[in-house]
Amino acid sequence: MEQRAQVIAVDGPSGVGKGMVVRGLASRLGWHRLDSGALYRILALAAQAASIDLADTDRVAALAAKLDIRFDGDTEEDERILVNGTDVVKEVRSETTGGLASQIATAPAVRAALLQRQRDFRVAPGLIADGRDMGTVVFPDAGLKIFLTASAEERAKRRANQLSARGQVVRLADLSAEIRARDERDRTRAVAPLVPAPDAVEIDTSLLNPAQVFERIDELLKTRGFLR
């Protein structure tokens, strides 16, 4: 039987540093990467472009098979998200699109449509998967599961800085409220709630800089045999 490619799952809410960690690990190990949250954002944007009501989840789900998606770039500055050959990273990363994605993320039809799309990213030499249920639902056999956390206040500040760097004007209070509301929806949803896998290693990034986060993760990689 052919051995499946290895997976490192990185889960957690928005603003905890998942993107930074996944891009860094993918670059360091030479593995592929998956931003599963972006898939939901991309699907929500595609539904809007097709004038499909997000409440019509069967029609939204049907769009999933028509989208050619690729993630490029090793840093946030050079990141590209190509959908059918067009870079849509700015639209995908907007806070408004995040809210739209959260609206469809609980729909069983949408989750079923995207589940196999996510698993298809698992190819040699390996995959770094970023999301909310990578270690619990999509890749329960991942060789390493990391669950990142941070305070809502710190996450709002980070997100505001990211969006400001992209030329988007945001109010910190509004952003913090949106993050808290989305967290509540994600934690309490019936389908694949935002919870760490029982065997996940939790890292609180609230008071850690990027170098300190990677120092903790490097220890895990060595312990699990991903690094020598």
Image (tube, grey):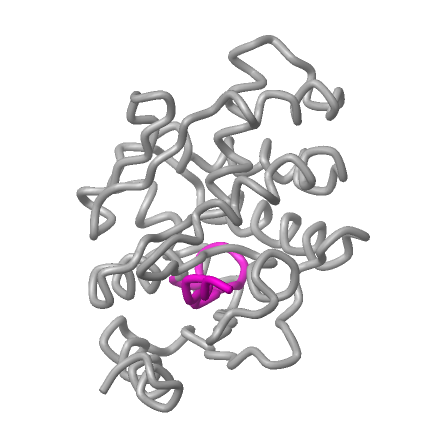
Report the quarter where the C terminus lies: bottom left
136 or 52, which is in the foreground?
Answer: 136
Horizontal side of residue 41 vs 222, given as left or right: right
Horizontal side of residue 181 vs 7, given as left or right: right
**Above or below for 176 versus 109:** below
- Residue numbers of the magenta segment: 1-17
Number of residue marks: 0
Kindly report the secondary structure that dominates the magenta region of the rendered protein: loop
What residue is rendered at 69% in x and 40% in y? 112
**Above or below for 56 versus 193:** above
Where residue 140 appears, as percent x and y from the top left, is 61, 67
Where residue 20 appears, as percent x and y from the top left, is 31, 59
**Above or below for 7 versus 143:** above
Where residue 196 appears, as percent x and y from the top left, is 62, 71
Horizontal side of residue 176 vs 17, given as left or right: right
120 or 213, which is in the foreground?
Answer: 120
What residue is rendered at 22% in x and 61% in y? 30
What residue is rendered at 48% in x and 45% in y? 120
Let me know if residue 173 is in the magenta part.
no
What residue is rendered at 31% in x and 50% in y? 161
Let me know if residue 5 is in the magenta part.
yes
Farthest-out residue, front: 1
